[in-house]
Image (tube, rainbow, N blue to C red):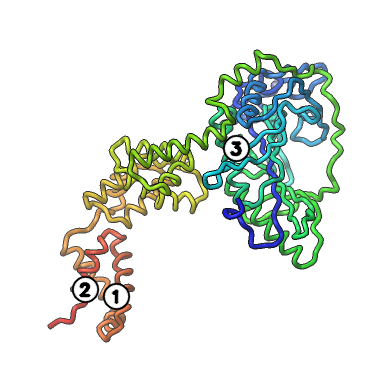
Amino acid sequence: MTQLYSQPNSWKPVIGLEVHAQLNTKSKLFCPCSTSPGDTANKALCPVCMGHPGAMPCLNAEAVHLALRAGLALGMRLHARSRFDRKHYFYPDTPKGYQLTQQEWPICTSGRLHLRDGEELVPFIIERLHIEEDSGRLQHHGEQALGDWNRAGIPLIEIVGAPDLESPEQAEDWFRMLHRVLVVAGVCGGAMEKGELRCDANISLKSPNGSLGARIEVKNLNSFRNVRRALQHEVERLGALLQSGEQVVSETRAWTGDKTVLLRPKEQTADYRFMPEPDLPDLVLTDAMVGPAVNALPGLPPLDVHLLRSDDDTLAKWMKTFGLAREQVTVLTRSPDMANFFGQCVESGGKPEQIAQWIQRDVTAQLKKRGVALSETPLSPAHILELQAGLDQGTITRAVALRILEWVMVRGGDIQGLVAIQGLERIRDAARIQALVAQVLAEHTEQVTAYAAGRSELFGFLMGELRSASKGCIDPRDMTMALSQALEPKA
Ligand SMILES: [Zn+2]
């Protein structure tokens, strides 16, 4: 990994991630309340998830099944006996005054998550996986806070990775891979915008002599990109502190979108007064519980290895079937989304080489620009095929095609309709082109004179003006020809 993720700084980041994933169940972890009650606040509540005296929790079997599936997918040890503990804290997002979690005896420990390094699969240690319930939500309005406890009691698994990641980029890859495993295993929906998957990142810097600096925790990172960016920010911030000789203290921080801010110093860590939940027996695994979890998985060894190997198979198959280069297929198969999208485009009649170019170059640029995944955009294979058809038939220019691509990736819509409404058909009529050229030259007489006097670089400037005046609707070759003709010294 050193080559891919090498750090120029002599202080090396040491990073570990903790992920909370919402389990795909219909009801909460200890009561029959719905996990998808809609938009009305405080609708899915009962005496159990409110912690009323005498209310008895009953463990959701489906949540246990999904947690086991996640454990198996990550190659973890399943523990025959685990237990729920009360973690006490008094805060308005928790109706009970405590959260049930598997503090002492988690259901799974010691697994692996693999990342690819060239031909090799490098394992990273997963320390533990345990089941716990979510807390409610608080909405702050100025001085006031409103509480919604619909989420209180929703089943989560917390997955704790060992601090063996060496860079923010690697941490992002790790989180992507974990997301993929949990979604493919059918454990978690994976919609980060809905809070179904959340990540906390721990980072410290290791000095050249090997001593570890104070640990910073960045809470609630809700996208792959934010994991990387928040960690990059911390690497720089901590590096600068150390460089200036200041002491780094352990603290918990939050990511605001462009920087991290202090939430609380670590010295204030609460005493949660953990105690075993007296109303629940130990969770004892039986064959009847483990068997279905094993059968539900697409294949053993661990799911991520399976996924990466099937990527290899796809790679070989696609290079052969579509005549694409290895690098192209690597990009296209980086996410299942993108691979499916490519497959659909080709099935609908797209030329593999052209479709690969659209996805690799133009679609990827838009995704990067907005920091979203392909599935989060309204782009469909039909859009790409129509844009390509427009170029092939010469009804739109490439500049227009790119503008429309950007539009449909944000708002969706019908390509022919957009072209018609916005008046973006390619201008081929020589008289119209000449009229636009004449207009541009009339508006820039100074530059025209300078050009005639030998400042040939002004041709590029005039091309730019003509491009704006025509909204990019003239093909660059037609523009060049018309402009050169108009600028030719008149005999
Ligand atoms: Zn309930």
Instruction: Give the residue at x 74% y 20%.
Output: 80
Residue 349 place in picture, x, y as percent: 28, 38
* Of residues 20 and 105, the one drawn nearer to the viewer in this rendering: 105
Q: Secondary structure at mark 2?
A: helix
Badge 1 residue CB within 8 Å of ligand 1: no
**Extreme left residue here?**
491
Instruction: For marks 3 and 1, give the one nearer the viewer.
Output: 3
Q: Residues within 10 Å of mark 2 (few under 14, many from 20)?
A: some
Ligand 1 located in image quadrant: top right
Distance from disc 3 to disc 1, alpha carbons, whole Å, reads: 53 Å
Considering only vertical position in the picture, is 489 above or below 94? below
* Residue contact at pointers 3 and 2, CB within 8 angstroms: no
* Labelled disc at residue 484: 2
Q: Secondary structure at mark 1?
A: helix
Which of disc 1 and disc 2 is earlier in sequence?
A: 1
Instruction: Give the residue at x 77% y 56%.
Output: 210
Q: Which residue is mark 3?
A: 178
**Where, by quadrant of the figure, is residue 427 drawn?**
bottom left
Instruction: Give the residue at x 28% y 53%.
Output: 423
* Of residues 138 and 428, the one drawn nearer to the viewer in this rendering: 428
Kindly identify the amino acid type of the residue bearing the numbered disc 3.
Answer: Leu
* Of residues 61 and 450, the one drawn nearer to the viewer in this rendering: 61
Residue 370 place in picture, x, y as percent: 50, 51
